Image: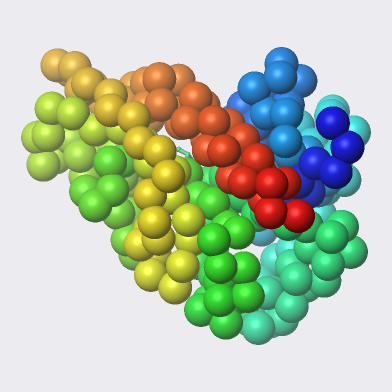
Amino acid sequence: MNNKTKIAVLVSGGGTNLQAILDACDSGIITHGEVKCVISSKAGAYALERAKNHGIKGYVVSKKELGGQEAFEKKITDILREHEIELIVLAGFMSILSENFTKKYEERILNVHPSLIPSFCGKGYYGLRVHEAALSYGVKVTGATVHFVNEIPDGGRIILQKAVYIQDGDTPEVLQKRVMEQAEWKILPQAVEIVSKEICKNK
Ligand code: GAR
């Protein structure tokens, strides 16, 4: 279809969620959106290789090198404008975006978080730490959430959630892998399609 929603994926690491989105575009799970660029907050992130292998332009935007949040967000905004981006997907993006930024993209930024929000979320809960917290609390069910991003970390409207059972003997690494396989890699592409379709409808 023409006129697909133009998507930017923001990453910091391995990029398995980016891969899930790219695979979903290829397999027809995502039909209303296309990934136009990938922006990494870290040089050398494997996610950039995944973008390259898919013929998608990748950028490194380092807050440290640019000297602060304002310059970091300005650089990201410039890239988004260049590609006329309509939907931003945070897929393992380990930097918090300021209210100044999120306000400009109301209900146009998605994030995947590896727990059932409102559990184990907010400032300080990211990556393996989320699974360590779930295991040390002793919950029996965890999962993943895709939500819109606003000024509150992990606080925006929820789009999709999926539960995953914790098993005896789980380590944070084992649990992280199960949550990715059973939840994140499924609900993130689904949510991208839902929101891309909605944006297409309103064009
Ligand atoms: C994923 O588990 C994602 O949910 C999590 O980081 C991992 C990135 O993996 N994100 C957060 O914790 C954000 N608060 P990936 O680079 O392989 O997609």
Q: Is residue 107 left or right of residue 51?
A: left
**59 shown above or below 5:** below
**19 shown above or below 159:** above
Q: Position of residue 91 (x, y in %)?
A: 57, 44
Q: Is residue 192 left or right of residue 5?
A: left
In this orientation, does residue 72 appear? Answer: yes
Residue at horizontal 88%, vertical 37%?
A: 2
Q: Is residue 36 left or right of residue 12?
A: right
Q: Quadrant of the C terminus?
A: bottom right
**191 shown above or below 185:** below
Write down the quadrant of residue 65 in the picture: bottom right
Q: Is residue 21 left or right of residue 119?
A: right
Q: Position of residue 34 (x, y in %)?
A: 78, 38
Observer-nearest residue: 84 or 37? 84
Q: Position of residue 12 (x, y in %)?
A: 61, 50
Observer-nearest residue: 76 or 61? 76
The mark total stands at 0
Residue at horizontal 28%, vertical 24%?
A: 164
Observer-nearest residue: 123 or 20? 20
Q: Position of residue 43 (x, y in %)?
A: 73, 53
Residue at horizontal 31%, vertical 41%?
A: 115
Write down the quadrant of residue 177 in the picture: top left
Q: Quadrant of the N terminus?
A: top right
Residue at horizontal 73%, vertical 39%?
A: 33
In this orientation, does residue 13 appear? Answer: no
**37 shown above or below 131:** below
